[in-house]
Image (cartoon, rainbow, N blue to C red):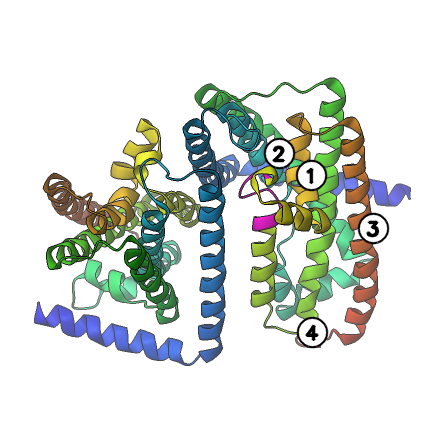
């Protein structure tokens, strides 16, 4: 147990050091990412103004708050892309990982967790700058702030497990990009990334509740915006835990089957 | 000029034959394009669920904008982007030498070598969306409108090309500019909506810094009865200026290219 904790801490420290070496690259990346929420923000603020000040319970200032937190959540949501598995398997990187006495999942999880601290630190100045331009309405209470912080990490953990599971399909077929594209499209539509879910028709909101996507994305944002009651907020954490454990269960199951199937290039 | 066209045709043929070997990618591309269409239409439906017009544009007119957005996006991914990505990596690796020693203009060569024909599915789909939108609007399109559209589309494409070339030329000095691809794709998404809806400073960025306005909004304006002769003239002037500036920057950048072994 102590060994595992040590491993995590070292790996996270490594990630922080590596990523701070390339502040410019990280910022370029973030700026490219800002374009998307700013577009949504402008469009929906225009709609809100046209409709006499608010739409679906959101004023332009609410939209500004939504999409500002969006940037942080989006970055926290970034995990190992399922497309990476093709390289891992094809080039035999995985074989190297398998020689270590610890499951490769730990290394990845720890590395990305460390990177998240860099992301949070870089988000702060960006958020301050954008606040001056778009004037968000963001005034969370203490419990909302605490639960938001937990939900932020919970969402990361959940999405990490889900995408690991998705990526492992690569063990069985190499024509995976169609499946991945479909997954990411559903995620875009039903996570609250495109638009706050309360602006969607009833049926779409029901679908979104049953799918995992919203719990990693829209839910933490709505939480800090004060759109949820304490009960709803706690329920959300429970749903995150449920999906994380479910995904983890299938990851373990699939991993065992995959290891029987896997033979590296050159083996 | 004839030599240029011959060269263009030869490279187009080689590039296409290369791509035609991978038939499965064609179906994958159709699938991806359809997903993009679903997301686009869904997004518009959400907006017009709440409001009747967006900054004076009707649903059908915004659909026309989306059609142009797909067409131009397809054009960029068929030719401009793959060529510029290849140029970026060749500058970094020093293998640009092989191109520079060829007996044709280097700028022409680096701009026409790659063609990803499967991406043209986007262009085709964009046209379908555009035609459908125009039928919905039902105002008819005169020959003059169509000509203006074609001219605006060509000029918009040229401006995007110049923008890409200038940015890519930056690799002669700073070497690593891979993130530029994501940066551009992010900003290009703004073209989904007419630039008129953006606040002033963003609109200026989208017009003169990254010419998304001229690439998408202006061609769409020509088909929805919004285009003025002033706008079209401005587009022409800007295209000429950008072509000259891009050429100068390219020439200047080449001078600081070291090559692989130098």
- Residue sitting nearer the eye, A96 or A208: A208
Q: Position of residue A130 (x, y in %)?
A: 48, 25
Q: State the residue at coordinates (11%, 39%).
A: B230
**Which residue is under mark 2?**
A118
- N-terminal of the pair, mark 1 or mark 3, is 1
Dominant SS type (magenta): loop
Question: Which chain is indicated by disc 2?
Answer: A
Q: CA distance from mark 2 to mark 1?
A: 7 Å
Q: Are marks 2 and 3 on the same chain?
A: yes
Q: Residues within 10 Å of mark 3 (few under 14, many from 20)?
A: some
Is residue A63 shown left or right of residue A96? left
Is residue B252 shown left or right of residue B15? left
Start-end of magenta stretch: A188-196
1 or 3: mark nearer the eye: 3
- Residue sitting nearer the eye, A172 or A58: A58
Is residue B87 visible in the rendered structure shown here?
Answer: no
- The circle on residue A114 is 1
- The circle on residue B115 is none
Q: Are marks 2 and 1 on the same chain?
A: yes
Residue A68 among magenta residues:
no
3 or 4: mark nearer the eye: 3
- The circle on residue A172 is 4
């Amino acid at each position: 147990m102590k060994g595992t904790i040590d491993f995590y801490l070292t790996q996270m420290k490594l990630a922080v050091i590596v990523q701070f070496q390339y502040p410019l690259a990280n910022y370029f990346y973030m700026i490219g990412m800002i374009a998307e929420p700013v577009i949504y923000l402008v469009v929906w603020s225009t709609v809100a103004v046209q409709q006499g000040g608010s739409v679906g319970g959101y004023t332009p200032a609410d939209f500004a708050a939504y999409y500002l937190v969006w940037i942080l959540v989006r970055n926290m949501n970034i995990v190992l892309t399922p497309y990476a598995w093709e390289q891992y398997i094809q080039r035999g990187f995985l074989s190297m990982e398998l020689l270590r006495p610890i499951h490769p999942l730990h290394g990845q999880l720890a590395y990305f967790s460390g990177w998240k601290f860099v992301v949070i630190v870089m988000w702060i100045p960006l958020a301050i700058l954008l606040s001056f331009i778009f004037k968000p309405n963001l005034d969370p209470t203490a419990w909302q702030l605490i639960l938001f912080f937990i939900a932020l990490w919970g969402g990361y953990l959940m999405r990490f497990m889900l995408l690991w599971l998705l990526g492992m399909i690569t063990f069985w077929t190499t024509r995976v990009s169609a499946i991945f594209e479909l997954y990411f499209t559903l995620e875009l539509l039903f996570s609250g990334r495109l638009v706050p879910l309360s602006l969607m028709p009833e049926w779409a909101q029901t679908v979104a509740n049953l799918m995992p996507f919203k719990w990693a994305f829209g839910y933490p944002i709505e939480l800090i915006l004060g759109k949820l009651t304490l009960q709803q907020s706690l329920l959300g954490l429970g749903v995150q835990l449920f999906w994380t454990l479910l995904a983890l269960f299938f990851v373990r199951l699939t991993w065992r089957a995959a290891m029987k199937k896997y033979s590296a290039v050159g083996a | 000029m004839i030599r240029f066209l011959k060269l263009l045709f030869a490279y187009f043929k080689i590039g296409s034959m290369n791509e035609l070997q991978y038939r499965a990618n064609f179906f994958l591309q159709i699938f991806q394009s359809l997903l993009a269409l679903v997301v686009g239409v869904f997004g518009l439906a959400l907006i017009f669920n709440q409001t009747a017009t967006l900054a004076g544009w009707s649903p059908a007119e915004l659909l026309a904008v989306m059609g142009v957005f797909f067409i131009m996006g397809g054009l960029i991914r068929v030719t401009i982007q793959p060529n510029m990505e290849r140029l970026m990596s060749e500058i970094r690796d020093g293998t640009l030498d092989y191109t520079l020693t060829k007996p044709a203009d280097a700028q022409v060569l680096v701009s026409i070598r790659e063609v990803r024909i499967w991406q043209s599915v986007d262009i085709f789909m964009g046209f379908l969306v555009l035609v459908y939108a125009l039928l919905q609007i039902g105002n008819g399109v005169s020959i003059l409108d169509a000509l203006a559209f074609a001219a605006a589309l060509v000029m918009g494409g040229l401006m995007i090309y110049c923008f890409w070339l200038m940015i890519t030329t930056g690799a002669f000095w700073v070497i690593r500019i891979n993130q530029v691809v994501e940066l551009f794709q992010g900003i290009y998404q703004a073209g989904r909506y007419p630039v008129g809806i953006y606040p002033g400073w963003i609109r200026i960025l989208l017009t003169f810094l990254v010419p998304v306005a001229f690439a998408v909004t202006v061609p769409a304006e020509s088909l929805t009865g919004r285009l003025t002769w002033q706008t079209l003239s401005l587009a022409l002037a800007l295209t000429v200026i950008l072509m000259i500036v891009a050429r100068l920057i390219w020439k200047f950048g080449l001078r600081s290219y070291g090559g692989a072994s130098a």
